[in-house]
Image: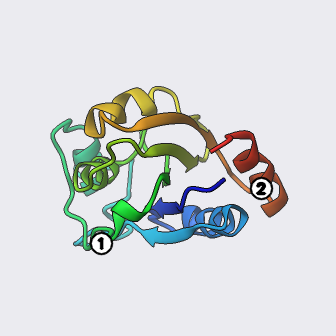
Amino acid sequence: MNKKILVAYFSASGVTKREAELLAKAAGADIFEIEPKTPYTAADLDWTNRQSRSTLEMNDPSSRPEIKNTVANMSDYGVVFIGFPVWWYTAPTIIKTFLEAHDFAGKEIVLFATSGGSGLGKTESALKPCAPNAVWKGGKLINGATESALEKWVESLAL
């Protein structure tokens, strides 16, 4: 691996943050938190409420929640791991906001996620239009992964 690596992640409850920190250590990567401009409250994340913020966002394909910051030096990175909790069988719409806010032309994107029960499903195909000139390398659920398991996964990607 001779490309500079970034681990960018969105974490609503802290679970994905813990995994992202382990992954960044395992990959020797820099880390960046994708933060919403308006933080999510517990009520916003109540998926059983059809009027909660997260439900409304996930039901609206054009939803792009504002992010607090962008990666100022994105051009420095050749590989970007993008992590998130799985919501409604896919990535939260804030991930589309993040992708569309940066130029990923020629960069390798590797998805990682945490989930209480579902896999990545068609997440990659849903996100590709937001960074069409990137090289997509698939993804993986990393619930409870160890640093050594993450090191092996990173090595297997031949980045």
Task: Tell me, for residue 9, which label it has, or none.
Answer: none
Whether residue 115 sits left or right of residue 122 in the image: it is right
Q: Name the residue under label 1.
A: 72
Question: Quarter holding the C terminus?
Answer: top right
Q: Mark 1: few, some, or many residues within 10 Å (few <14, many ≥20)?
A: few
Q: Distance between the residues labelled 2 and 1?
A: 27 Å
Q: Mark 2 points at which residue?
A: 151
Cβ atoms at labels 2 and 1 below 8 Å apart: no
Give the camera-side residue of 106 and 120.
106
As shown in the figure, which amino acid type bears the numbered disc 2?
A: Glu
Whether residue 107 sits left or right of residue 69 in the image: it is right
Residue drawn where x is 69% and y is 70% of the image: 25
Decide which of tag 2 and tag 1 comes sooner along the chain: 1
Expressed as whole percent of the image width and height from the top left, the position of residue 157 reads 67, 40
> Would residue 89 be visible to someone looking at this image?
no
Give the camera-side residue of 157 and 46.
157
Residue drawn where x is 54% and y is 71% of the image: 30
Residue 133 image-quadrant placement: top left
SS category of the residue bearing label 1? loop
Residue 20 image-quadrant placement: bottom right
Give the camera-side residue of 158 and 19.
158
Expressed as whole percent of the image width and height from the top left, the position of residue 98 reads 30, 55
SS category of the residue bearing label 2? helix
As shown in the figure, which amino acid type bears the numbered disc 1?
A: Ala
Expressed as whole percent of the image width and height from the top left, the position of residue 69 reads 27, 73
Give the camera-side residue of 44 and 20.
20
- 40 shown above or below 1: below
Whether residue 68 sits left or right of residue 156 in the image: it is left
